[in-house]
Image: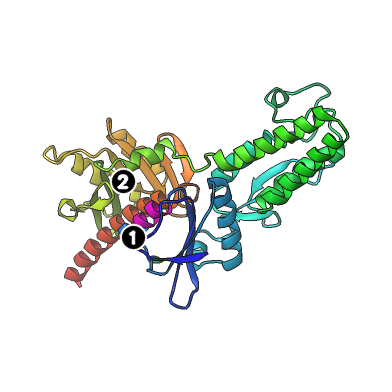
């Protein structure tokens, strides 16, 4: 990777890294547009952001995905490890069957680590059109539905050919794209010399398909959840409650207009209940907030909690979207779906965490203030 001037970062696809003065990597990420991604980190003032920036340009998102995996495995950057422990990284594994299937899981024996499982899955699905493999332990005697989609090799493939498909996939995900393509080019040449032109044409088509997938695969697509949060003018309200066994319970509302906090719109609530019931306390805070007709309604409410807190909020609101973020595994419940923050683009995941943490900070500070008055 090469060091770049923070003011002259190019708008290219590839991998970027923040390092300290000793040259130790603090955080490694990938982006379709490195300049835009680094600017978003700088705007949010993340802990790992420094002026020591290195980048490596890649020709495609596919190659950026693979390089990111290799560099994280090699350098174990501090803030990548803090963000995801080893159990949360994804690995490409194969079963021990005679005709092995491919799996994406957290088993570290496989190829990886990869940061986002969805991106790995999309890349694997793209390659499957060139190197089909089995979906089930035992293939039926006739063609299955995946065969008609050219995703399955069918019941008559030879073991040698099947293993070649699996090995080619692993080689490409290991960063050995050139060796795979060179191997096929030699095979095509061999068929041509033997005047087996049909076979040579099939190999040629496979080479073209591999190159097309690697250079054109869109693996960093935005989810419709993500698109909602990216709308700049959106008003987002986040809520948190703080108490000590029910005593001096407080509620906090923080407001973000797009990505920026609007501290002048923050509000504090003294909770009347003395029972240590976070869900009931949240209900009281939301009811009181909604009574203020003079306050503009938000497009989104972010709740600190899981399904129980989400359900309470949904019952109280009608035309307002509600999301809940569970702390334990950083699960985001939204629009009938559950997603892990680790599966979302880093800048979006950090935005959600920043909003949640700001609500928690504001609630804690008010709670301490009330307790200190009594003490």
Question: Which element carries disc 1, helix, strand or loop?
Answer: helix
Location of the C terminus (image quadrant): bottom left
Q: How many marks?
A: 2
Instruction: Give the residue furthest to the left.
Output: 294
For the stretch drawn in magenta, what is the main secondary structure? helix
Question: Which element carries disc 2, helix, strand or loop?
Answer: helix
Q: Which residues lie in the magenta part?
A: 34-40
The picture places residue 224, in percent across and down from the top left corner, at 41, 35
Judge the density around disc 1: few (<14), some (14-19), many (≥20) Cα neighbours within 10 Å. some
> Which mark, residue 350?
none
Question: Disc 2 or 1, which lies upstream in sequence?
Answer: 1
Residue pictured at 82% horizontal, 35% vertical: 192
The picture places residue 62, in percent across and down from the top left corner, at 57, 46
Instruction: Give the residue furthest to the bottom.
Output: 22
Residue linked to disc 1: 42
Say if 223 sits above or below 258 in the image: above
Residue 331 painted magenta: no
**Camera-nearest label, 2 or 1:** 1
Residue pictured at 29% horizontal, 54% vertical: 241
Q: Would you say 158 lies left or right of 143 here?
A: right
Residue pictured at 35% horizontal, 56% vertical: 39
Say if 47 sits above or below 169 in the image: below
Residue linked to disc 2: 280
Q: Would you say 287 lies left or right of 225 here?
A: left
Residue pictured at 29% horizontal, 61% vertical: 361
């Amino acid at each position: 990777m090469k060091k770049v001037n923070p003011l002259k970062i190019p708008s290219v696809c590839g991998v970027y890294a923040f390092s300290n003065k000793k040259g130790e990597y603090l955080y490694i990420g990938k982006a379709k547009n490195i300049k835009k991604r680094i600017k978003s980190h700088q705007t949010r003032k993340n802990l790992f952001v420094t002026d020591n920036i290195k980048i490596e340009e890649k020709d495609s998102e596919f190659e950026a995905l693979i390089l990111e995996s290799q560099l994280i495995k090699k350098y174990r950057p501090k803030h990548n490890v803090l963000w995801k422990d080893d159990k949360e990284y994804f690995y490409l594994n194969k079963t021990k069957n005679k005709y092995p299937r491919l799996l994406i899981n957290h088993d570290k024996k496989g190829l990886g680590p990869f940061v986002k499982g969805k991106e790995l899955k999309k890349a694997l699905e793209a390659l499957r059109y060139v190197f089909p493999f089995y979906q089930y332990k035992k293939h039926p005697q006739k063609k299955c539905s995946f065969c008609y989609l050219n995703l399955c090799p069918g019941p008559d493939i030879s073991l040698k050919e099947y293993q070649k498909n699996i090995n080619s996939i692993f080689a490409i995900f290991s960063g050995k794209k050139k060796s795979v393509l060179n191997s096929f080019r030699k095979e095509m040449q061999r068929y041509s010399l033997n005047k087996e032109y049909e076979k040579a044409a099939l190999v040629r088509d496979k080479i073209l398909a591999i190159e097309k997938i690697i250079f054109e695969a869109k693996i960093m697509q935005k989810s419709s959840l993500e698109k909602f949060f990216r709308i700049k003018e959106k008003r987002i309200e986040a809520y948190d409650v703080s108490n000590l066994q029910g005593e001096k319970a407080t509620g906090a509302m923080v407001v973000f207009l797009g990505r920026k906090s609007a501290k002048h719109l923050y509000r504090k609530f003294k909770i009347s209940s003395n029972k240590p019931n976070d869900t009931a306390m949240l209900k009281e805070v939301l009811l009181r907030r909604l009574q203020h007709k003079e306050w503009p309604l938000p497009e989104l409410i972010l709740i600190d909690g899981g399904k129980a807190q989400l359900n309470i909020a949904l019952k109280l609101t009608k035309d307002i979207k509600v999301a809940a973020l569970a702390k334990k595994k950083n699960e985001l419940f939204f629009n009938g779906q559950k997603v892990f923050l680790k599966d979302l683009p880093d800048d979006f995941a950090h935005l959600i965490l920043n909003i949640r943490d700001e609500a928690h900070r504001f609630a804690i500070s008010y709670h301490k203030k009330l307790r200190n008055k009594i003490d």
